[in-house]
Image: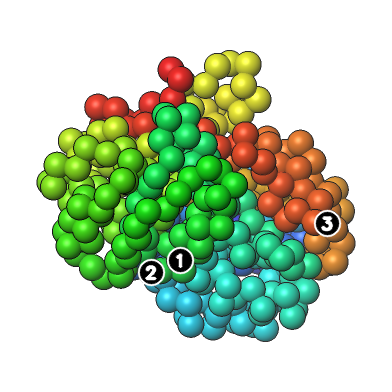
Amino acid sequence: MSLGMILRRGVIAAGAFLLAAPALAQRAPEPIRIGAVLSVTGPASFLGDPEDKTLRLYVNRINQAGGVNGRPLQLIIYDDAGDANRARTFATRLVEDDRVVAMVGGTTTGTTLAMRPVFEDARIPFISLAGGIEIIDPVQPFTFKTPHTDRMACEKIFADIRARGLTRVGMISGTDGFGQSMRGQCVRVAGAAGITIVAEESYGPRDSDMTPQLTRLRNAQGIEAVVNPGFGQGPAIVTRGYHQLGIRLPLYQSHGVASREFINLATPAAAEGVRLPAAALLIAEQLPTSDPQHQVVLDYKAAFEREFNQPVSTFGGHAYDGLMILVEAMRRANSTDGTRLRDAIRATRGFVGTGGIVNMSATDHMGLDLSAFRMVEIRNGDWALLGN
């Protein structure tokens, strides 16, 4: 129980006992219960930890400002440690025991897909923070997401490869849910993008050395660039091995590594020159003041880094966007009824978040287009917006 809830209950008890001050006996507004199942620990903790911190920070801020429609938010968070079965168990608990009215969470594609049927069956809006396109394609009535999709990442990467005059790529993909999903999307859109996939390799989430796979890619004929669909520690290991083997071809990573931790794990020397699509949050200070996202990302970055004394990541930004989209929908709907809230979320238009400008609809439960992605390159151990 939070300190605020304890204090409110103390006031209610005192008012009921004293009788002479009946105003004190008025019941505090019923809190709005919001659920979150995140991978705060485990292999995806570099995603889940900033999500957890962001939700706690901004729920507190919203409550200090008066809550939503006069009611405080009560955030109920469970840590699935990246395990899909645990995630589904916690989702069931949120629905049946905690009686949440909405869910902001689902750190990975795998945990999100495990939880989705629970919230769909309960007709409770679920805003995922994971990347896989299958989360919202085909559209599910009560499921939404805030990050850019893996299909968008493939399209953005391939466009940059073509802009460099290259067309033939090799891929080394993670076998986790996100890696498999993005690999499939890259294969699907390669032809339309004018890209030929010459050779493919893969690695498991627990693999600690990708030298054999990278050696085969290095020796493959005709490869002009390498794309690594994956997240977690795998892409950092790939990047280190790529550098150690002296491979000089351009290396592209996914938006699933868009955090300072990736550069640290890969080492700045190995990561030098790596490119990836990412949200504007990574290069907040490099945005022109005329950019609609400029002030939003600067404000979030300042608030997060001041509160937690650690670098901001796009993953925390996904949680910020999800929470704020939900809160705005609650205010517009003036209701926590599942269907009304669902309708208000998908009526979101012109929401300026850390991930882009969101315009949802009944057929688009993400609301971002390709312009929301920025291509960045790692230079001297930091992010640089391409074109700058």
Pointers 3 and 2 in contact (C-beta within 8 Å) = no
Residue 220 drawn at (x, y percent): 25, 53
Give the colour scheme shown: rainbow
**What's the distance in space between the residues labelled 3 and 2, CA to CA?**
32 Å
**What's the distance in space between the residues labelled 3 and 1, CA to CA?**
27 Å
Q: Which of marks 1 and 2 is nearer the N terminus?
A: 2
Q: Is residue 128 above or below residue 328?
A: below
User: Residue at horizontal 43%, vertical 62%?
Assistant: 179
Check disc 2 and report the residue beneath it: 175
Q: Is residue 330 above or below residue 375?
A: below
> Which element type, helix, strand or loop, lies under badge 2?
loop
User: Residue at horizontal 38%, vertical 47%?
Assistant: 169
Disc 2 marks a residue whose amino acid type is Thr
Pointers 3 and 1 in contact (C-beta within 8 Å) = no
Residue 8 visible somewhere in the drawing: no
Q: Earlier in the sequence, mark 3 or mark 1?
A: 1
Check disc 3 and report the residue beneath it: 362
Disc 1 marks a residue whose amino acid type is Gln
Quarter of the image with the C terminus in it: top left
* 236 on left or right of 230: left
* 307 on left or right of 37: left
Residue 361 drawn at (x, y percent): 81, 51
Check disc 1 and report the residue beneath it: 180
Q: Is disc 1 surrounded by few (<14), some (14 to 19) or many (20+) residues within 10 Å?
A: some
Quarter of the image with the N terminus in it: bottom right
> Which element type, helix, strand or loop, lies under badge 3?
loop
